[in-house]
Amino acid sequence: MPNAKITGTGWYVPDNVVTNDDLSKVMDTNDQWIVERTGIKERRWVKDRKFVGAAALAEPAARMALEKAGKTPADIDLIVFSTMTPDYVLPASSCILQKKLGAVNAGAFDVVAACSGFIYGLSCAEKFVKSGMNKCVLMVGAELFSNRLDPSDRSTTVLFGDGAGAVVIEPTDEEGGILSTHVHADGGNYEILYVPAGGSYDPISKGEHERIYNEGLQFLQMKGQELFKIGVQRFSEAIMEALTHNGFKIEDIDVFIPHQANARIIEMVARRMKLRPDQSIVNIDKYGNTTAASIPIALCEALDKGMIKKGDLVVMAAFGSGLTWGSAAIRWI
Ligand code: UT7
């Protein structure tokens, strides 16, 4: 069985910067509250949202990852696209991305695991490659969430940003690469973070849209404090599972890349797990929570800054709606 290796990485965020001060002009919030409670200073939102979808954000990230891997779109034999904001109800955004790239030889499917989307998608890609089924998998996490936020809800709108990250995964005979991935879910808590309307359970159909719009059910609903506590717990468990499975200890981690949900969550997890400050990658100040895109964007930045070297142990962990959580352990080669 071959090992699976990340051979290319790419990312993209829209140019349009929305600062905390910009938001304080349109809602009852302020820079101090947002920075103290979340660590976010600014985020990127697609400016002209008409007829732009997640696949449009994914395309430049995917092209960058392919270039770094030395691959062309025709080389891709599978696209795994993690998003909770697909372009359409159907088809999958992976198919829209396939068309945009001209990846004519690829199979394509979407993964819906919200903020844990990158870990879930990576786990799928890893298995397709390690099984020998696929030789060049493009895995993207992309989210255009700004248009799902309730402009009258300051507790959610300030948190999220748009963006995309991509990795190319190929088989290798070298030791290392993706050592393990673990994924978990607890559907019993799904109402802590969800969008109630717009799916098959409560479709935005004629005669129903007025009720839905009046109650804001098409927007994200979140019980922030509950989520915070569960998040700290699940993050910590996810890290431990990745370490225990591979026989590592906390001090073996060279770089920890957490999903960027809240800088305070990351700090609390780091304190609990006794991680050194220099072990964690934090860039939520610039992009907010970009859900499935947050880990690959942070990965790209860490690589660009030379923070990840060959041979390093990189541990990733995520937590989000579902509720879902999971981890990945990667020996960088
Ligand atoms: O990616 C995974 C999904 N997301 C998460 O994991 C998020 C987890 N939760 C959190 O990050 C935090 O709970 C939040 C950042 C969402 C909220 O922080 P908090 O410290 O838990 O604040 P809170 O909800 O307890 O609210 C405290 C106060 C409230 O006012 P009162 O009732 O004390 O008068 C809120 O109305 O802060 C108020 N508030 C705000 N004030 C200014 C809530 N949002 C804002 C805001 N600006 N944007």
Image (tube, helix red, strand yellow):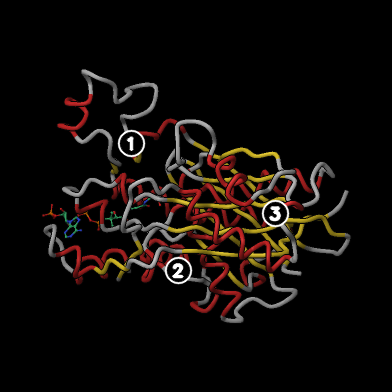
Q: In the rendered image, which residue does mark 2 sit on?
A: 271
Dots 1 and 3: beta carbons under 8 Å? no
x then y, percent, for residue 34: 24, 65
Q: Nearer the viewer, residue 199 or 223?
A: 199
Sequence order check, earlier mark of 2 and 3: 3
Residue 290, image x, y percentages: 42, 57
Q: In which of the image's four quarters is ligand 1 placed?
A: bottom left
Q: Earlier in the sequence, mark 1 or mark 3?
A: 3
Residue 223 drawn above or below residue 45: above
- Please, what is the three-letter code of the amino acid marked with disc 3? Pro
Give the residue displayed 73% in from the left and 58% down from the top: 72
Residue 65 figure quarter: bottom right
Q: Quadrant of residue 24?
A: bottom left
Residue at far top of view: 207
Task: Tell me if 98 is positioned left or right of 151 in this view.
Answer: right
Q: Which disc number belongs to residue 73?
A: 3
**Foreground tag (2 vs 1):** 1
Distance from mark 1 CB to nearest ligand 1 atom below 8 Å = no
- Residue that sits furthest to the bottom in the current view: 306
Q: Tell me the kind of residue under disc 1.
A: Val
Q: Which residue is mark 1?
A: 195
Q: Residue 310 placed where, x, y %?
A: 74, 76
C-alpha separation, residue under disc 2 versus residue under disc 1: 32 Å
Q: Is residue 94 above or below residue 327?
A: above
Q: CA distance from mark 2 to mark 3?
A: 43 Å
In the displayed structure, 239 sits above or below 98; it is below
**Amino acid on which disc 2 is placed:** Arg
Drawn side of residue 326 relative to residue 115, left or right: right
Q: Secondary structure at mark 3?
A: helix
For mark 1, does the 10 Å Cα neighbourhood hold few (<14), some (14 to 19), or many (20 or more) residues? some
Asked whether disc 2 touches disc 1, contact meaning CB atoms under 8 Å apart, the reply is no
